[in-house]
């Protein structure tokens, strides 16, 4: 699997370099004159048929007459007997709870003083370059002529 990944990486890098070189060669070609195209023929227009004119006012539509709705017969009134009343529940005597015992007091611990922490040794600083060094293999060759 590692060899396949290496192969894909090498193939990608090779295609990148070839695309860069192809683009550079295209940029150095002289500009060619643009070909002129003949004018397009005009589109013929078809004759339009005349549209009929509509009357200014429309005749009124006839009003439909609907038959009357049937009446629903009245339902007989039903009287329900009264609901029975609930029996009364006897009241329970109120229970009284004894008071909770108090918690014992916790003894206090003596205050401890810690010695100061030792200072940490300082780390040496490594200078980091702010510019990337140029690698001759990856940089393009100098231009021989001005475009």
Image (cartoon, grey):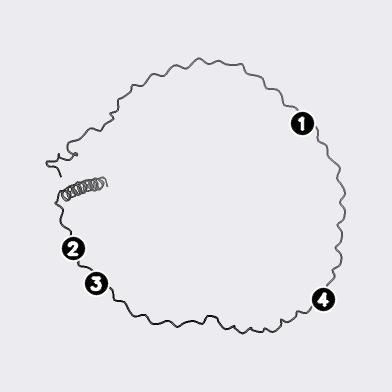
Taking the image as shown, residue 60 lies to the left or right of residue 71, namely: left
Per the image, the residue denoted by label 4 is: 76
Q: Which residues are magenta?
A: 96-100
Instruction: Say which label, 1 or 3, has the lower sequence index.
Output: 3
Per the image, the residue denoted by label 3 is: 41
- Helix, strand, or loop for circle 1? loop
Please tell me whether mark 4 or mark 2 is closer to you in this view.
2
Per the image, the residue denoted by label 2 is: 36
The residue lying at 60 percent from left, 16 percent from top is 111
| CA distance for labels 2 and 3 | 15 Å
Pointer 4: residues within 10 angstroms few (<14), some, or many (20+)? few
Pointer 3: residues within 10 angstroms few (<14), some, or many (20+)? few
Instruction: Say which label, 2 or 1, has the lower sequence index.
Output: 2
Where's the C terminus, which quadrant? top left
For residue 96, which quarter of the picture?
A: top right
10 vs 44: above or below = above
Taking the image as shown, residue 81 lies to the left or right of residue 134, namely: right
15 vs 36: above or below = above
The residue lying at 82 percent from left, 76 percent from top is 76
Q: Position of residue 133 (x, y in %)?
A: 23, 32
For residue 45, which quarter of the picture?
A: bottom left
Residues marked 1 and 3 touching at CB (< 8 Å): no
Instruction: Say which label, 2 or 3, has the lower sequence index.
Output: 2
Residues marked 4 and 1 touching at CB (< 8 Å): no
Please tell me whether mark 2 or mark 1 is closer to you in this view.
2
């Amino acid at each position: 699997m590692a060899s396949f990944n290496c192969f894909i990486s090498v193939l990608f890098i090779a295609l990148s370099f070839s695309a860069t070189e192809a683009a550079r060669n295209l940029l150095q070609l002289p500009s060619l004159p643009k070909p002129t195209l003949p004018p397009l023929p005009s589109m013929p227009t078809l004759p339009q048929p005349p549209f009929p004119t509509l009357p200014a006012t429309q005749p009124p539509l006839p009003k439909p007459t609907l038959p009357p709705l049937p009446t629903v017969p009245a339902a007989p009134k039903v009287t329900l007997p009264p609901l029975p009343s609930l029996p009364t529940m006897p009241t329970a005597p109120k229970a009284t709870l004894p008071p909770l015992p108090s918690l014992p007091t916790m003894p206090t611990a003596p205050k401890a003083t810690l010695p100061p922490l030792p200072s940490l040794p300082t780390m040496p600083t490594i200078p980091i370059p702010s510019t990337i060094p140029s690698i001759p293999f990856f940089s393009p060759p100098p231009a021989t002529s001005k475009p």
